[in-house]
Amino acid sequence: MTEPVTLDQVARAAGVSRSTASRVINGGVASAQSIESVNQAVADLGFVPNRAAQTLARQRTDQVAIVTPESPAAMFVDPFIAIAIDAISHRLWRAGLQPQLALTDPADPIATTRRFLHHSNVDGIIVVHFIRDPQLEELLTELELPLVFVGRPPDSTRDFPYVDADNVHGGYIATKHLLDQGRRRVACMGGALVRIAAVDRRAGWLRAHREAGLEPGPYVELDFQAAGATAAAAELLRADPAVDAVFAQSDTLAVATLHAAAAQGRRVPEDLAVVGFDDSAAATRVSPRLTTVAQPIALLSSAGADLMVERLRTGRWGSWPRVFPTELVVRDSA
Amino acid sequence: MTEPVTLDQVARAAGVSRSTASRVINGGVASAQSIESVNQAVADLGFVPNRAAQTLARQRTDQVAIVTPESPAAMFVDPFIAIAIDAISHRLWRAGLQPQLALTDPADPIATTRRFLHHSNVDGIIVVHFIRDPQLEELLTELELPLVFVGRPPDSTRDFPYVDADNVHGGYIATKHLLDQGRRRVACMGGALVRIAAVDRRAGWLRAHREAGLEPGPYVELDFQAAGATAAAAELLRADPAVDAVFAQSDTLAVATLHAAAAQGRRVPEDLAVVGFDDSAAATRVSPRLTTVAQPIALLSSAGADLMVERLRTGRWGSWPRVFPTELVVRDSA
DNA sequence: CTGTTAGCGCATTCAC
DNA sequence: GTGAATGCGCTAACAG
């Protein structure tokens, strides 16, 4: 807990002016002589520049926030978010930017997210897995910071740069795969409809039915990573025995469906076909192995980070949106 | 992207001085008249105080960093870390402090952690799941920021406030439980020994053997959340068939052991007894349900956060260390 | 209750 | 190549 050392002290110790010391430290031009003595002084005194002062003077922080309107616990459970954050961090570090993950108060994620968006001292914000929320959306429009969405934002805020996976197509191919093999009543277990991804996947599910001239089965709305998913799936199968296939919007939900089916003595895929989403690690750990829709999470997240990096470097946006393809991985469950 | 509004502009618009405007905004004394007009101006102009300037002037940030020397992906996979972060966030928010999770570069978590410890602009740092690393440890001793460890730091840095679970006792009761029921060769699958928790749990395992006058079985060292755990467990069982019990230092490892045993046709607990650690959600989802050591992660993490909050508020440390009890939860696997 | 005055620690323009 | 001067936006004594 020593008293923090200032640039002034370094300059004095090195026998030069503050500006020269500053130049040396930031790699500007200076005589070999100055460079030598300043570096010496920095080492001797253990000088570490004060971030706040630098920020104030430079008018930039070299920090980028990653925010996702979820409680920390929820963030950690969702494989999409985990992979996205990992990829984004890597990209930002490589570009010389420090990522900062905004942690919300589990007691009120939305409110604290709002607070973060407003008062953060960062150069830009990358929003992962945004949700529909009138207050948040309004906030965005008046925000004065570069913003990138990983996972497209709601229509009302369409003018923000984003990257995404082609969720509509993902829902479509999953459902089509089921219908093509003769399934006639395809239920969908989806994310809450405040999630854009859930809306899109649902749209794909509907479209496949429309094209086939069939009525869609029931839509069960619950969280992608819902703890009560097994119970919900069991209820679905019980309430509507005609359901012969389920399109689950996440592998977590698909696995839960598998459990529920097993408990009711229904064989997969014979009696019930199941398609998941994400192609997560869980997909190959269950039996039968999951047929699921793969999305390139790391890739699209990196693209999102790149968008931010370019904006911060050049002052202008690269091309967007960038929408990455989803594809069906056929295994044993459908 | 409008030009940021400054306090000056607010003051001018309100027809008062900067200091009065500042007072009103920060809840100081002022006439109803001033309060009225300043608030009006703030609203009209959409004033948001500049964090860097505030920090510089106040000499504090009201932000606390949470750092853990892991890649983001690893952080997200470890249930201890997830729960700890959730609990810490909540406590900090409640105290009016903003938590900031330091995200490391997956390509080099240690280096970026080091960087963070050094250059962060926060009032204090909470370190979760520290590991033994000479460079990091040295850094700590010269750090000039309040520091709290969730999970005790290495002996070399013993003088830092910390909270922890009683891991030695946890390892002891797990092993004793196995020995008491007549198991004679108890292997241990543990975390890498750079983890303090792994060292401590191993110590408990050894102590139980010493007390019983028995030779400990083999110690298998690998990550708590290792992907290859099932293979490692299989190898262990094959290489040393006399092993009739396994103390796994995490539920993830215990579940892997279950899988390996099943694959080799060994019944649990008849042929092989297994005890896990964490009492995580996974413990009751497997069959047989896991006997495991519970540790109050949220509780101890909150205590860690409280330590920091008190230090920041009062300038002095509360009493530490605070070591929370671990206890055995007996289910079906041992 | 209010305005004036000084910084907080650093970057940077401008003459020298 | 270098130093003096100025400002980033805000807070906090200090008089009044």
Image: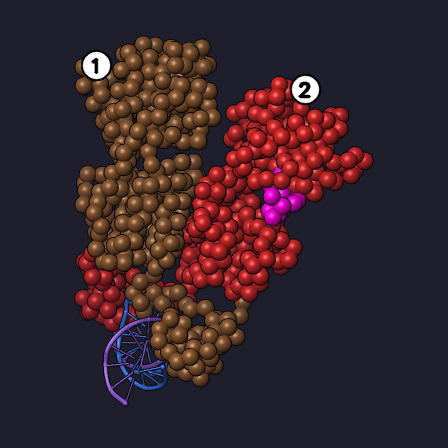
Chain colours: A red, B brown, C blue, D purple
Q: Which residue is identified by label 1?
A: B214
Asked whether, in this view, residue A170 is left or right of residue B67, the answer is right
Q: Which residue is identified by label 2?
A: A270
- Residue B33 position in % (x across, y down): 43, 81
Q: Amino acid at mark 2?
A: Glu
Secondary structure category for the residue under label 1: loop
Quarter of the picture holding the N terminus of chain A: bottom left
Report the span colored magenta: A190-200
Q: Amino acid at mark 1?
A: Leu
- In the image, what residue occupies the spot 46% across and 55% down? A112
Relative to B298, is B215 above or below? above
Relative to A323, is A220 above or below? above
Asked if the stretch drawn in magenta spans residue A195, the answer is yes
Instruction: State the residue in front, A104 or B78.
Output: A104
- In the image, what residue occupies the spot 24% across and 29% down? B168
- Residue A234 position in % (x across, y down): 61, 28
- Residue A61 position in % (x across, y down): 40, 61
Q: Are marks 2 and 1 on the same chain?
A: no
Instruction: State the residue in front, C10 or B285.
Output: B285
**Quarter of the figure with residue D16:** bottom left
Asked if the stretch drawn in magenta spans residue A3, the answer is no
